[in-house]
Amino acid sequence: MWLSKRQNVQTNSLAEEGKLTVNSASLTETTATMQSRNAADYAPYGYSACVPVGESVLLLNGSGGICRAGVRMAEEQLAQGEIEIESLGGAKIRLMNDGSISLNGLIISADGRITNGEVIDF
């Protein structure tokens, strides 16, 4: 039957996970079955990052060639609607779902009060 013949047809994947193996000023390289040298990086507007070697990245194969679409997120315990940005050196900014901001443990409440991570009633 034509259905069984069609199921045996293999298609190339348009997305694949790989490990970043080189990241210098003039060269980036990712190991995966897709060849990826100096692939373009894509992120939300305003975000810039230099991905550390060894991180898992998502490769997309499109008509313009291969690009990196992002880095696998850490298994962080974020509540729904929260966003965290962390550098390799450990600096952290967390936008919390109650409107407050955590900046390396310093808490800025939604109404602008600053604490060192402890809840302070005024």
Image (spheres, rainbow, N blue to C red):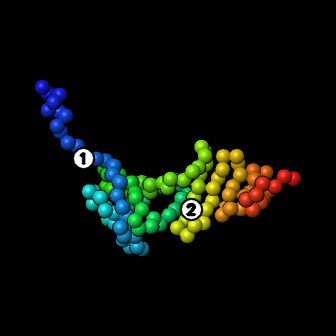
Q: Which residue is mark 2?
A: 86
Left or right: where does residue 71 sit relative to residue 80? left
- Front position in the image: 13 or 122: 122
- Image quadrant where one finds the N terminus: top left
Rendered location of residue 109, percent (x, y): 75, 53
Task: Please provide percent x and percent y for residue 105.
Answer: 68, 62
Up/down of 11 relative to 34, above or below: above
Residue drawn at the location 66% of the way across and 46% of the way down: 97
Residue furthest left in the image: 1
Q: CA distance from mark 2 to mark 1?
A: 34 Å
**Identity of the amino acid at label 2?**
Glu
Element on which disc 2 rests: strand
* Dot 2 crowding, Cα within 10 Å, few <14, some 14–19, many 20+: few
Which residue bears the numbered disc 1?
12
Mark 1 burial class by Cα count in 10 Å: few <14, some 14-19, many 20+: few
Q: Secondary structure at mark 1?
A: loop
Please state the horizontal and vertical placement of residue 27, each as a whole percent of the image. Answer: 36, 71
Report the side of 76 relative to 16 (left or right): right
- Residue 38 visible: no
Q: Nearer the viewer, residue 30 or 91?
A: 91
Q: Are marks 2 and 1 in contact (CB under 8 Å)?
A: no
- Which one is earlier in the sequence, the residue at label 2 or at label 1? 1
Residue lying furthest bottom: 25
Residue 23 as seen in the image, left or right of residue 6: right
User: Which quadrant of the figure has residue 92?
Assistant: bottom right
Going by the numbered disc 1, the residue's amino acid type is: Asn
Q: Nearer the viewer, mark 2 or mark 1?
A: 2
